[in-house]
Image (tube, grey):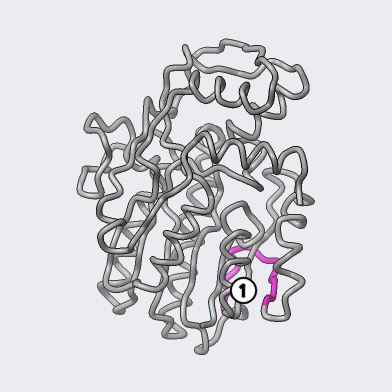
Amino acid sequence: MKVLVTGAAGFIGSHLAEKLLQQGHYVTGLDNFDPFYDPRIKEQNIKNAVASENFHIIRADIRDTSAVNNSLDKSFDCIVHLAAKAGVRPSIRNPAEYADVNINGTVILLQAAQKYNIKKFIFGSSSSVYGNNKKVPFSEDDSVDHPISPYAATKKADELICHTYHHLYGIDVTCLRYFTVYGPRQRPDLAIHKFAKLILQDQPIPVYGDGSFKRDFTYIDDIIQGTLAAIEKCSGYKIYNLGESNTISVNQLIEILENYLGKKAKRENLPSQPGDVVQTCADVNKAKTELGYKPTTNINKGIEKFVDWLKNPS
């Protein structure tokens, strides 16, 4: 199989590219090495993939129509679209850029899929589309008409655009709502990575609100397993939650980090931030039934693995 992975130098994208290569597939990665965080980290992320003769990296923006079209031809079987402007809080500061990258870029990729008759399109969506959903756990059938950040709104818009291209051109589309992914190579601005480094440096960690906000933390290996299953079974237009269904609070997370780091955290209590949802919790029964999704890494084991990587990155 021949696959285009956008955002291939990022956290999830680099893991997916490696796994596809291990399975014997041909992978083209498309990434603009956005300086949202240090691009040298992204270079490190893809070093293993670059070593494979079956991997090709294209350094370009998904909004560059010519670059996207030059990356593809009719021999491709699938596009896995993971590239995006990431982050809830930054999207509030710069909503226009988030809309441009996340929505316009997705349209350009869907246009390319239609042009080259690429029938499988996997879209990396987000649990943020649920907003402050009152029903727990969150199900794919729940309303997602009330996002509370521009980032979440762009992901919801992209799901709708994906449906439009499925309806008009028969492209098989699977939208994967990822729930708070963590593990080796996690973005340095995200809570687990950021907290762990600050604890090791004896620096205070920012705790917004009283630390009671809850997240469904999902280990990267489980996310990759679900994504690979989605590629294999992609048919029609489908939406799946990929999470662990084991929500914990920020306070509990800090305690687990303290345990595996062997150090107590210093806390800096700050006001709650606009756009932050109170909790996330995935109902993954649909993914289990239809994709064979099998999350196996609980938060304690996942944090242990993450800390091992943080202390000995490879």
Is 269 placed left or right of 107 in the picture? right
Is 97 placed left or right of 231 in the picture? right
Q: Is residue 34 above or below residue 215?
A: below
Q: Nearer the viewer, residue 187 or 64?
A: 187
Is 190 placed left or right of 202 in the picture? left
Does residue 61 show up magenta in the picture?
A: yes
* Residue 258 image offset from top left, x and y in percent: 63, 21
* Residue 120 image offset from top left, x and y in percent: 40, 75
* Residue 214 image offset from top left, x and y in percent: 41, 26
How many neighbours does mark 1 have within 10 angstroms: few (below 14), some (14-19), or many (20 or more)?
Answer: some
Does residue 177 show up magenta in the picture?
A: no
* Residue drawn where x is 60% and y is 80% of the image: 26
- Classify residue 175 by image quadrant: bottom left
**Disc 1 marks which residue?**
21
How many marks on residues? Answer: 1
Q: Of the residues shown, which amino acid type is indicated by label 1?
A: Leu
Is 178 placed left or right of 256 in the picture? left
The residue segment tinted magenta is 55-69
